[in-house]
Amino acid sequence: MGIHDVYPNDLIEKVAEELKKIDAIKAPEWTKFVKTGVHRERAPAEEDWWYKRAAAVLRTVCVMGPIGVSKLRTKYGGKKRRGHKPPQFRKGSGSIIRKVLQQLDKAGFTKFAEKGVHKGRIITKEGKLFLKKIADSIGKVKKEETMPVEEPKKEVEIVKKKEIAEVPKKEIQEVKKEPKKEVKEEEKPETKQTEIKKISDVSSQKQIEEK
């Protein structure tokens, strides 16, 4: 597993922890109050930022080498706030990057080389092995975390078809249907009125005949 197969942030954190154990790489005393560039307003809040910057520079040299101080300054630069004016880009501190590269050279992880037109720092075999070991350790941890945990299989009771009680067809046919209740239709008021009219007509005819 290479450095490209691991997240850069995870790799830089692990490399920074390993760089603390190396005697050639030490944070100067002025790292407590210095800024990393003109664009910054304050010094870094983390106490071990020097080792993280060294780890980031080592990874950048491995990926982009040969690379010099000027390109690294642009990589670690940023925008400077200027109040109501629009922000402008400023390069990072060159002194920090130069001293980090000098310490990495002493540790044997980087060296100066020229390849055609380009010249600058490149990573050595020791540096590649150093990064590869850390990347492999991170990859193993990630695989163990992502491995699915096998749950114990539950014994499923198999029910036979013969054991299921089947309802006989005769019983289903003998089920009596509930008789429907006959609902008497209410007499409409119109029919009552017609009957009353007929009775009144008959009574009036009788009276006329008697006369």
Image (cartoon, rainbow, N blue to C red):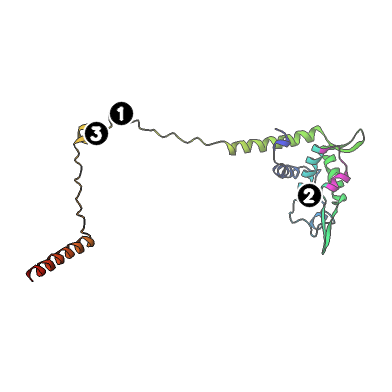
Residue 7 sits in quarter: top right
Q: Are marks 1 and 2 in contact (CB under 8 Å)?
A: no
Q: CA distance from mark 1 to mark 3?
A: 13 Å
Residue on which disc 2 sits: 50
Q: CA distance from mark 1 to mark 2?
A: 74 Å
Q: Residue at x 11, y 69 (%)?
A: 208
Q: Amino acid at mark 3?
A: Val
Residue furthest to the left in view is 210
Label placed on residue 161: 1
Q: Residue at x 87, y 46 (%)?
A: 98
Q: CA distance from mark 2 to mark 3?
A: 82 Å
Image position, residue 162 (x, y; %): 28, 28
Q: Amino acid at mark 1?
A: Lys
Q: Nearer the viewer, mark 2 or mark 3?
A: 3
Q: Looking at this view, is 62 or 127 the one in front?
A: 62
Image position, residue 113 (x, y; %): 89, 35
Label placed on residue 167: 3
Q: Earlier in the sequence, mark 1 or mark 3?
A: 1
Quarter that holds the N terminus:
top right
Residue 35 seen by the camera: no
Q: Residue at x 85, y 40 (%)?
A: 105
Q: Earlier in the sequence, mark 1 or mark 2?
A: 2
Residue 171 sits in quarter: top left
Find numbered disc 3 in the image and state the secondary structure of the residue it sits on. Answer: loop
Q: Crowdedness of circle 1 by 10 Å Cα count: few (<14), some, many (20+)?
A: few
Q: Residue at x 50, y 35 (%)?
A: 150
Magenta region: which residues? Answer: 64-74
Q: Earlier in the sequence, mark 2 or mark 3?
A: 2
Residue 133 seen by the camera: yes
Q: Is residue 119 above or below residue 73?
A: above
Q: Crowdedness of circle 3 by 10 Å Cα count: few (<14), some, many (20+)?
A: few
